[in-house]
């Protein structure tokens, strides 16, 4: 069965970086995109970007263009999100989610979420 | 940039009621529209893709419809377990979620 498991909660100071891991299993990792979506406390869902697990090619939402790096390691079926220059308004739950097999950017399996708190 | 709106932002209904949530895009999105359910403290769950395609395991009381810029999620008979926030999401190009509709009983 498909499983998507993320790394644990993080607490960071403003200006620091965070790297969140997303390990997939139960399917052929390289056949799908992995997307990153975040949710600030009490707020809605915000798409951050995606990575092709096959090629490593990425697309980002424009507002994160300069601060986000998405990578993957196909040998361990794991994708990573790095967010730099953290600010207090980056405090959120960060989700990874699998895109549809067709390549369409809707999300059928989600990780459990990684809470990231940015506080001095 | 395309904007996504949802109405209402919240609603309260009784068990067995028919509930309708509307999602509107500021321009056409080629029917690239999905709906998600997020229960309190839980991960979002995909309910519907391509406007009206129900995902496997999702109860048939959930129905999606619409075209162009106007879309609807209908719960034909509201159940207690349907208490959640519902999000629409366009995916014709860069994904974008609507602001959500909170459903109470």
Image (spheres, coloured by chain):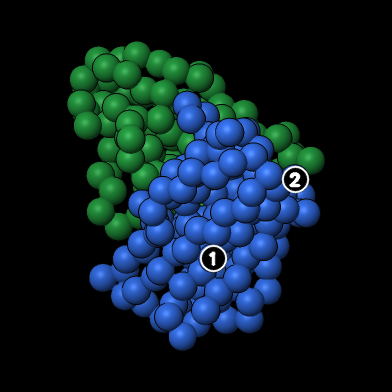
Chain colours: A blue, B green
Please state which of the two labelled residues, at mark 1 or mark 2, is closer to the viewer.
1
Query: Where does the N terminus of chain A fall, quadrant-wise?
Result: bottom left
* Label 2 element class: helix
- State left or right for residue A82 relative to residue B43: right
Query: Where does the C terminus of chain A fall, quadrant-wise?
Result: top right
CA gap, disc 1 and disc 2: 19 Å
Residue sitting at the far bottom: A75
Q: Position of residue A67 (x, y in %)?
A: 72, 53
Q: Is residue A72 above or below residue A82?
A: below
Residue that badge 1 annotates: A80
Q: Residues within 10 Å of mark 1 (few under 14, many from 20)?
A: many
Residue that badge 2 annotates: A63
Q: Chain of mark 2?
A: A
Q: Is residue A17 above or below residue B69?
A: below
- State left or right for residue B79 relative to residue B73: left
Q: Is residue B75 above or below residue A52?
A: above
Residue at horizontal 38%, vertical 39%? B37
Q: Position of residue B16 (x, y in %)?
A: 21, 22
């Amino acid at each position: 069965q498909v499983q998507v498991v993320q790394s644990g909660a993080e607490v960071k100071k403003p200006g620091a970086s965070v790297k969140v891991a997303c390990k997939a299993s139960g399917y052929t990792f390289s056949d799908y995109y992995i997307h990153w979506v975040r949710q600030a406390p009490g707020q809605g869902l915000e798409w951050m970007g995606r990575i092709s697990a096959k090629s490593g090619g990425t697309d980002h939402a424009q507002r994160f263009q300069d601060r986000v790096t998405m990578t993957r390691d196909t040998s361990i079926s794991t994708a990573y999100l790095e967010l730099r220059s953290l600010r207090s308004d980056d405090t959120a739950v960060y989700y990874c989610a699998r895109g549809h097999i067709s390549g369409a950017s809707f999300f059928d399996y989600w990780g459990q979420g990684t809470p990231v708190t940015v506080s001095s | 940039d395309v904007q996504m709106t949802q109405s209402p932002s919240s609603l309260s209904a009784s068990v067995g009621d028919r509930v309708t949530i509307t999602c509107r895009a500021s321009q056409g999105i080629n029917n690239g529209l999905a709906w998600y359910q997020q229960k309190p403290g839980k991960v979002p769950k995909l309910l519907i893709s391509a406007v009206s395609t129900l995902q496997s395991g999702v109860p048939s009381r959930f129905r999606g419809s619409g075209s162009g810029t106007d879309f609807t999620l209908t719960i034909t008979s509201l159940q207690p377990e349907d208490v959640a926030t519902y999000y629409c999401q366009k995916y014709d190009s860069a994904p974008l979620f609507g602001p959500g509709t909170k459903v109470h009983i």
